[in-house]
Image (spheres, grey):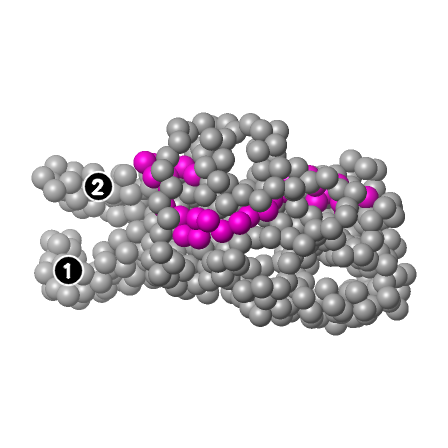
Amino acid sequence: MNILILGATGFIGSVVAARLVADGHAVTGLGRNPMRARLKQPAIDWRRADLSRMTKADDWDEILKDQQVVVNCAGALQDGPADDLAATQAEAMLALYLAAKRGSQPMIVQISARTTGAAGDLPFLATKRRADEALAASGLPCLILRPALVLGRNAYGGSSLLRALAALPLALPLVHAESPVETLSVDDVAEAVSRAVVGGLRGDIDLAADEVLTLADLVSLHRQWLGLPPARVLSLATWLARPVTWLADISGLLGWRSPLRSTAMTVMSEGIRSAKGESSIVATSAAATLSANPSGVQDLWFARLYLLKPLVISGFSAFWLLSGLIPLLAIEKTSAHFLPFMPEVAATALTLATCLIDVALGAAVLVRPLAKRALLGMLAVSFAYLTGASLLEPALWLDPLGVLVKVMPSILLTLTALATLVDR
């Protein structure tokens, strides 16, 4: 069959795509930036598209041509510079259904979620619910899948946070530690989609393993999976998480998709439960999912670096902002370093220029779409400072405060930040 997958570059979408290719189907994958995915999964016909801009039925006509099944694995947690929930999760889907009805009427598989509860009125679930209801009423052949917390060999979002929390030293500080959590394997989702494609599943189905863990149980299970000794769980009051959630929401507005944003915390406040009934899909338990994918040293590195990453980025921002702002408080004294080599006006102008560059880089690194270019700029400026200082005043290498020597670890940390910048 010809199958179109929306969000095929994502955590769930990439596994579903691989399964359907293995089943012998002709798969077309849709993503905003499929360049890396095209290299990793060359058997898929990759197409670049932004769902938030496909909100009219006409936008779908060409891409739906000859497609027999559409699998929607796309979604986002909260609005941000690159995420428009209303457009992506609701308006684009309604336009898709309209185009499908007036065309070949392909089957639609919608990867959704439980849309009731404490977070039910938040945009994340409200937009999914709107799309689900429209799909159910459309008359198109469809399957709405509502998986619980999805675990897999790779990690993204909430599953990344589980690994990071599990790798903390000494103790495991958790908010909502006793909240119930149901899980399943990402391969279970792919199995359900595979069966739906050949006509085995229809309707509205919740997917979860037949077990209910607490959040503390799940984090401890991940700690064991990482090969770390048991650690005491510290159950924290919810108010202690509010500053972290506030900062995570601010970072979301800057393009960073933190799993600690308010939507995720609201969902976790009552746990992740399903309303599963009779189903032919036997979901895999958390322990079985993890044991089927033994961890390696790369998983431990990822877990330990995950929460360090935002600290490194914010630390870099503070470092470069301060290095640009502090000299401006004594501009004459700062520019005096250049007086032996150039006139006073030129020295002042050069000082102002370098300060403004530092401030610009410090601000830009906080904005996710600009972060890579900002880090590369930091590397270029650091090497320029080292080269210029070495040529003009080589004695600075022997300065007791290590003015130039201290630039070297900064360069190495910048390279580390670049290496960990990719989210998935």
Residue 270, percent from left and from top: 52, 57
Residue 76, percent from left and from top: 58, 59
Q: Nearer the viewer, mark 1 or mark 2?
A: 2
| Residue 182 among magenta residues | yes
Which residue appears at 49% of the width and 61% of the height? Answer: 266
Which residue appears at 30% of the width and 51% of the height? Answer: 315
Q: Earlier in the sequence, mark 1 or mark 2?
A: 1
| Label 1 CA crowd tier, 10 Å (few <14, some 14–19, many 20+) | many
Q: In the image shown, does 254 or 202 lie closer to the viewer?
A: 202
Alpha-carbon span between mark 1 and mark 2: 21 Å
Residue 97, percent from left and from top: 80, 66
Residue 26 seen from this side: no
Badge 1 vs badge 2, beta-carbon distance below 8 Å:
no
The residue that mark 1 highlights is 335
Magenta-highlighted residues: 166-195
| Secondary structure at numbered mark 2 | loop
* Residue located farthest toward the right when viewing the structure as drawn: 104
The residue under label 2 is which amino acid type? Lys
The residue that mark 2 highlights is 406
Residue 203, percent from left and from top: 80, 56
Judge left or right: residue 223 versus residue 59: left
Judge left or right: residue 422 versus residue 236: right
Looking at the image, residue 222 lies above or below residue 126: above
Residue 232 seen from this side: yes
Which residue appears at 58% of the width and 37% of the height? Answer: 286
| Label 2 CA crowd tier, 10 Å (few <14, some 14–19, many 20+) | few
The residue under label 1 is which amino acid type? Ser
Looking at the image, residue 369 lies above or below residue 304: below
Q: Return the mark for residue 83.
A: none
Which residue appears at 66% of the width and 46% of the height? Answer: 208
